Image (tube, rainbow, N blue to C red):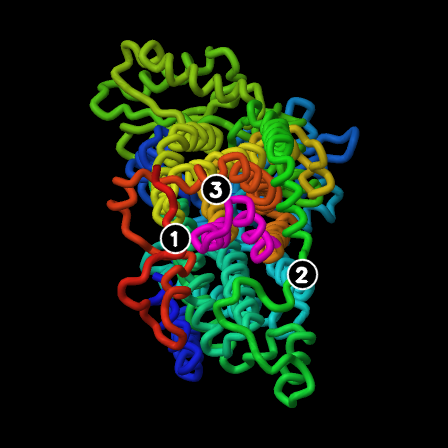
Amino acid sequence: MAIFLHRVGRIAFRHRWYVVLVWAAVLALAGFGALSAPKASDEGFSMPGIESQKAFDLMEQRFPGTAADGASARVVFVAPDGERVDAGGNRRAVEAAVASLAEGPQAVSASDPFRAKALSEDGRTAYATVTYEAGPKDLTAAARDRLKGAVEDARGAGLTVEVSGKALDEGGGPGGTAEATGVAVAALVLLVTFGSLAAAGLPLLTALIGVGVSLASILTLAHALHLSATTSILAMMLGLAVGIDYALFVVSRYREERSRGHEPREAAAVAAGTAGSAVVFAGLTVVIALAGLSVVGIPMLTKMGLAASGAVTVAVLIALTLVPALLGFWPNAVLTRRARAGRAGRADGTGGTGGGRSARDDAPKDATEGWGTRWARFVLRRPLPVLLLGVVGLGALALPMTDLRLGNPGDEAKPVSTTERRAYDALAEAFGPGFNGPLTIVVDARGTKDARDAVRTVARRIGDTGGIVSVSPARFNEAGDTAVFQAVPSTAPTDERTKDLVTSIREERPEIVSGTGVTFAVTGTTALDIDIAGKVQSALVPYLTVVVGLAVVLLLLVFRSLLVPLKAAAGYLLSVLASLGVVVLVFQQGHGAGLLGAEHTGPIMSLMPIFLVGIVFGLAMDYEVFLVSRMREAYVRGRTPGESVTEGFRHSARVVAAAALIMVAVFAGFVSEDDSMIKMIGFGLASAVLLDAFVVRMALVPAVLALLGHRAWWLPARLDRLLPRVDVEGEALHRRPAGTDTPPSGTVAPREVSRT
């Protein structure tokens, strides 16, 4: 691996113009494809295998032309204090608004709240439901303008009017502020780390090119592969974060090799062979984690994972080719000012000793004992207290996770400044907390002689169930063999009692349909959220098994050790559980939620654990590979276990810390978004990276390695013979004659690691 990537680095450096032109062509072709590709079709969210989805599918089959999750809007009218909404000028204003909405573009119907009895008991609040023939993303500007105009006219008449529903969803992802914030912080971190504008700018430039290629490719394939707008969010997050990190590691190793006396081309080649090898395997762990999302069985999640793995793959390829090529254009610009001045002095005979340094020297000439070395020595002197403190601290943060409740936050989680949140609150106050999350009952009466009587019986029995406050009249399809009605719970959609109610109705289904000859399914947004949470929980263990198992095997190849991969996996589990605990602490229990703009607490988004488990595992293994590969590199070259830990920290600690801060900055930037899902994902990923990089990798890893000593690098002899050698630490590069690409025959590694 190291020899092959060494050749790639040399070729990219030597033929830099061709490499740059190739990537420019790829970016241009992807951009042209994105501009010319047809718009992605909006197929909505689907979750095969759950009762709610089966009921949605049955509705679309038996009620042709009416999408179960089509665009709709609920307009809420509230009269001033002491007045009724169905009296005098208030009634006329509501009727005028409803008439205007019914005649609007793409509108199918608009219900009259007074005829539909959509009026609160005190007569102060009413609502009208507007349905459209198009999906949310296919609504025209004229349709939305008519909706906004009718609302403003009713407000002008003195009513309080708020709107909720999918008709307000214009699609799209983050607005750009998050990305700009992440890039700005990343630039600052890179500048402080490298002390050079060119060195700081190069990783940013290559990362942005990679993100551009990835996002343009996703847009090009969106229509053919039925990708939604949310598919690109994860690809953008990870593409930007790992793109900067991978380029950062290659540039850092290049600077290190230059300080050892290598000429620019050889330094770029060695950087590609060593840091590039770590990049390849770090990228592979991320790709495994993301591609493993397909195990969950959620099509949207599978597409997001595969799109993000594509973005990570592009970042790896750019780090191995474009970064060495750009170093060829500015070989000295990425060095510190002191290093450039020293080289200029040696060139004119005013500086240096004239003897030069061997490219085989173990340490840079200007190496000083930095904070990484001092910290490593501190941990080596006190490994057990550091280990215990880290484990106890992460365990304490993980405790709130025992109270984890999964769901999908809706309008109640939005800021009170939004009309959707105000509409939610008005309806809950007027009609009860369960009104915002009615259960949709789909009755399949095909083959039943008296379908209408059977449906009435089922509706009556469900209405008598404890926790149901009302049942709407049933609506039949044209064939008369399928009916749909709504049952309103007494509790809010995200209340645990609502979940128990749905479970109870389903469990009592045989008694409810007894003697009717029909069957029914419970669906609707509330039931769908409950089913999604259940499916995600059941998929967590298989997903963890697949991802962690594959990654442990991969790390076994990289480090040729049994204990190091197991330690890496155990540390990851600690960090991901702690980050989940922090998410519960903030978004469910409300501690500090106001500081993040989360004005409502409730259940954690159902997909959040899967996102954290998958994405954080890949990123955690990134830091494991980058940090520990330098330790193993020192160990196989003859250093003691303690010296190897110190050597790894001396070379990698500052760069790993910078990479982690960049990741945290990129993810934390998404906390500023209004979308509660993106806000929660950004916060969860940022906290997970922070805990994993600075507690697990920087503290627990050296502590465990110090306690294990030589045993950390033990591998049974039989397994050692079976495993292929991938040479991530670049042993072959250190053994080869200077200026060649292949090791001499008959050479052996500097240290033969004990297998006993």
Alpha carbons under labels 2 and 1: distance apart: 33 Å
- Residue at numbered disc 2: 368
| Badge 2 element | loop
Q: Is residue 636 left or right of residue 491?
A: left
Q: Callout 2: few (<14), some (14-19), or many (20+) C-alpha neighbours within 10 Å? A: few
Residue 630 magenta-highlighted? yes
Q: Residue extending furthest bottom?
A: 348
- Residue at numbered disc 1: 284
Alpha carbons under labels 3 and 2: distance apart: 40 Å
Looking at the rendered image, the quarter that the C terminus falls into is top left
Residue 513 magenta-highlighted? no
Alpha carbons under labels 3 and 1: distance apart: 17 Å
- State which region is magenta: 628-653
The earlier-in-sequence mark between 3 and 1 is 1
Q: Which mark is residue 731?
A: none
- Residue at numbered disc 3: 611
| Badge 1 element | helix
Question: Which label sits in the foreground, 3 or 2?
Answer: 2
The earlier-in-sequence mark between 2 and 1 is 1
Question: Which label sits in the foreground, 2 or 1?
Answer: 2
Residue at screen point 46% across, 53% down: 638
Residue at screen point 73% across, 38% down: 594
Q: Amino acid at mark 3?
A: Phe
Measuring from the top left, give residue 721's x and y in whole percent: 25, 46
The earlier-in-sequence mark between 3 and 2 is 2
